């Protein structure tokens, strides 16, 4: 029952908004996009009901304004269809919709003089502008609306009294000021929360010493990359990099020197690999590198580059350079259904083979063993 309900909700969202995907950190943009979709549809529904009322004689509206309402209805529906599933069009269509709405409100102001409350549409417009177009647009539209009402009142078929106009202008100014301050605080709060969440997420997924992905985040990322590689029928490889005799470095020079060595090695590995590769610290002196779209020959070449770069690193502790070497295991696969744990075990075995063969070398483990 719950699954069916969730499927129905998903289907309804796709009808309203189309198939859209917002990345993490775009929550406010997603809200704006959905809000504009709902606003356009609400305009379509409300205008349709008013036109039905005119058709059955429930209310009387100037024929010219009926034409204006019909145009507004058609444009609102067209803009919704143009926006649906296309968030990249949001800003342009939001401005177009605001212009369409203002034209409709002005039409109602001049052609529906029997309705004293028709001016309320200008008030309902202000919050939407601040939400959809931001503070500058909100302030500009608020001041423009106030100026337009003040100057245009004398030309209305039934002008508002001086007292009524003064009340309208003060209320518009208050409403604009309220949303200007509230919008600024809300966006500031959202930005701080997003940055705080990003920092917390980074702390949860990265090693505090080297700033590489920690083991959990690294393996999760690799499983996603493997899924993508298998879907595209691409090879992928894994390097298991282990520093030789690292315990001796800690015992001889101290843990602070060991941390310095790990940071230096990290910088070296990151400098050698490609931007598309994933690097993680999966143990004390153990690193793993996932190489998408890389066959065995390419993986061995990159592993040799890393081994050579680390050997020539010679980080200085005190006044003394420390020679560091690595043993690197290489495993490659294009097997359907294989997960990261399986290929990592083979890379791990290849690394131990490198250790057994004398360290400071690269050893490979193929699918055939």
Image (cartoon, helix red, strand yellow):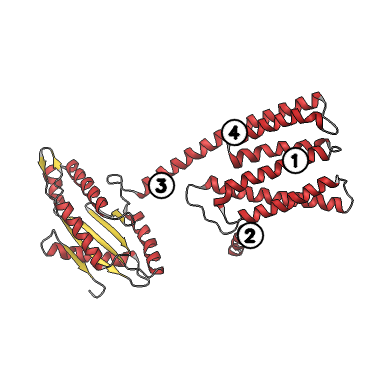
Residue underneath mark 3: 201
* Foreground pick, 247 / 239: 239
Q: Residue furthest bottom?
A: 368
User: Where 230 falls versus 277 (above or below)?
Assistant: below
Q: CA distance from mark 2 to mark 4?
A: 32 Å
Q: Residue 101 versus residue 240: which sits nearer the camera?
A: 101
> From the viewer's perspective, is the residue at label 2 or at label 1 nearer?
1
Q: CA distance from mark 3 to mark 4?
A: 28 Å
Q: Nearer the viewer, residue 355 or 325?
A: 325
Element class at badge 3: helix
Specify the label residue 182 is tagged with. 4
- The earlier-in-sequence mark between 3 and 1 is 1
Within 10 Å of the Cα at label 3, are there few (<14), some (14-19), or many (20+) other Cα atoms?
A: few
Q: Residue at x 15, y 42 (%)?
A: 254
Q: Quadrant of the N terminus?
A: bottom right
**Distance of mark 2 from mark 1, alpha carbons?**
28 Å
Q: Residues within 10 Å of mark 1 (few under 14, many from 20)?
A: many
Q: On residue 15, which mark appears?
A: 2
What is the secondary structure assignment of the residue under circle 2? helix
Which of pointers 2 and 1 lies earlier in the amino acid sequence?
2
CA gap between label 3 and label 1 equals: 46 Å
Q: Is residue 252 left or right of residue 158?
A: left
Residue at position x 63%, y 29% in the image: 177
Q: Are marks 2 and 1 in contact (CB under 8 Å)?
A: no
Numbered tag placed on residue 105 in the rendering: 1
């Amino acid at each position: 029952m719950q699954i069916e309900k969730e499927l129905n909700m998903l289907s309804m969202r796709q009808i309203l908004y189309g198939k859209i995907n917002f990345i993490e950190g775009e929550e406010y943009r997603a809200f704006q996009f959905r809000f504009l979709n709902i606003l356009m549809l609400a305009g379509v529904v409300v205008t349709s009901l008013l036109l039905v009322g005119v058709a059955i004689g429930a209310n009387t509206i100037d024929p010219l304004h009926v034409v204006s309402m019909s145009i507004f209805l058609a444009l609102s529906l067209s803009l919704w269809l143009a926006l649906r599933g296309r968030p990249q069009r949001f800003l342009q269509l939001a401005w177009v919709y605001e212009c369409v709405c203002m034209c409709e409100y002005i039409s109602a102001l001049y052609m529906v003089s029997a309705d004293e409350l028709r001016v309320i549409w200008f008030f309902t417009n202000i919050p939407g502008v601040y939400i959809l177009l931001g503070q500058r647009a909100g302030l500009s539209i608020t001041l423009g609306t106030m100026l337009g009402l003040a100057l245009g009142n004398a030309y209305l078929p039934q002008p508002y009294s001086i007292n009524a106009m003064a009340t309208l202008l003060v209320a518009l100014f208050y409403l604009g000021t309220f949303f200007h301050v509230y919008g600024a605080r809300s966006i500031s709060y959202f930005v701080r929360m997003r940055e705080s969440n990003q920092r917390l997420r980074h702390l949860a997924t990265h090693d505090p010493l080297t700033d590489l992905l920690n083991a959990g985040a690294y393996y999760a990322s690799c499983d996603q990359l493997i899924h993508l590689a298998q879907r595209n029928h691409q090879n992928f490889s894994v390097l298991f990099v282990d520093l030789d005799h690292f315990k001796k470095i800690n015992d001889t020079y101290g843990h602070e020197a060991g941390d310095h060595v790990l940071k230096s090695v990290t910088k070296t590995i990151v400098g050698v690999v490609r931007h598309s590769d994933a690097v993680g610290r999966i143990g004390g002196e153990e690193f793993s590198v996932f190489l998408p779209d890389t066959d065995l020959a390419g993986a061995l070449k990159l592993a040799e580059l890393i081994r050579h770069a680390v050997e020539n690193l010679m980080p200085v502790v005190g006044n003394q350079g420390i020679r560091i070497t690595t043993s690197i295991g290489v495993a490659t696969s294009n097997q359907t259904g294989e997960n990261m744990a399986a290929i990592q075990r083979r890379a791990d075995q290849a690394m131990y083979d490198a250790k057994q063969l004398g360290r400071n070398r690269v050893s490979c483990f193929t699918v055939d063993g």
